[in-house]
Amino acid sequence: MSESVPTVERYPGPRRTATDAERRALASTTRLRILRACMDEPMTNRQIAQRLASNPATVLHHVRTLVASGFLAALPARRGSRGAREVPYLATGKSWYMDVGAMSRDVLLATFLEEVAVVGESRLNSSRIGLRLSEAEWEEFTARLHGLLDEYAHRPSTPGAPRWSVYVGMHPEQA
């Protein structure tokens, strides 16, 4: 019989503007990468540090910030392979419901670029399109796109399936 993955209370929504503390917690590429690593798989501080190729003490600082702001939840402590006490952490999904404003958007792009650098640009699946849309058409397009992203964000993860990271960026073109 396979061991079940522990769960945490998922953030119920709705979307809202992030508080200053929440915005600061999400204003770090390391913290966003930690949330991605713990998206559906509980990981200890040591495991997170290994995944990010980072110092465990530095990662612990970021983990504590994410726990304090409700983006990461500590699961019950367990004994590791050498008998040491380990605390696994799991993302709560709260970050998906936060409007972080312009302050953190550059961090979202920087995080995505860091993740691409780790796996290599040859593994990046990207496309680009230019559109000329009325205001109503633009609103319809963005509502449908965000609806699709919401649909997939709310689906339960498929155990053992490959992990994917999706970044969508849109901007108006210069006149």
Image (tube, helix red, strand yellow):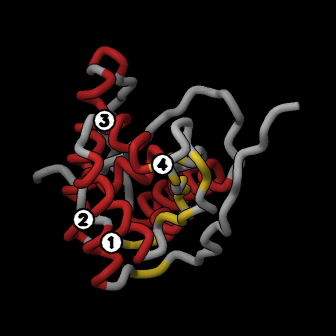
Quarter holding the N terminus is: top right
Crowd tier of the residue under label 4, counting other residues whose Cα lies within 10 Å: few below 14, some 14–19, many 20 or above: many
Q: Nearer the viewer, mark 1 or mark 3?
A: 3
Give the secondary structure at mark 2. Answer: loop
Residue 27 badge: 2
Amino acid on which disc 2 is placed: Ala
Specify which label sits upstream in the sequence, 1 or 3: 1
Q: Is residue 144 visible?
A: no
Res 44 label: 4
Disc 1/disc 3 C-alpha distance (Å): 20 Å
Mark 1 to mark 2 CA distance (whole Å): 9 Å
For the point 30% across and 50% down, which residue is it? 170
Measure the C-alpha gap from mark 2 to mark 3.
16 Å
Query: Which secondary structure lies at badge 4?
Result: strand
Q: CA distance from mark 1 to mark 4?
A: 27 Å
**Height in image: 87 above or below 126?**
below
Q: Is residue 23 above or below residue 62?
A: below
The reply to whether residue 41 is visible in this rendering is yes
- Residue assigned mark 3: 115
| Mark 1 vs 2: CB contact within 8 A | yes
- Residue linked to disc 1: 100
Mark 4 → mark 2, Cα distance in angstroms: 22 Å
**Local crowd at mark 1 within 10 Å, few (<14), some, or many (≥20)?**
many
Amino acid at pointer 3: Glu
* Of the pair 110 and 135, the residue shown nearer to us: 110
Mark 2 is surrounded, within 10 Å at the Cα level, by few (under 14), some (14 to 19) or many (20 or more) other residues, namely some
Q: Residue at x 44, y 47 (%)?
A: 36
Tag 1 near tag 4, CB within 8 Å: no
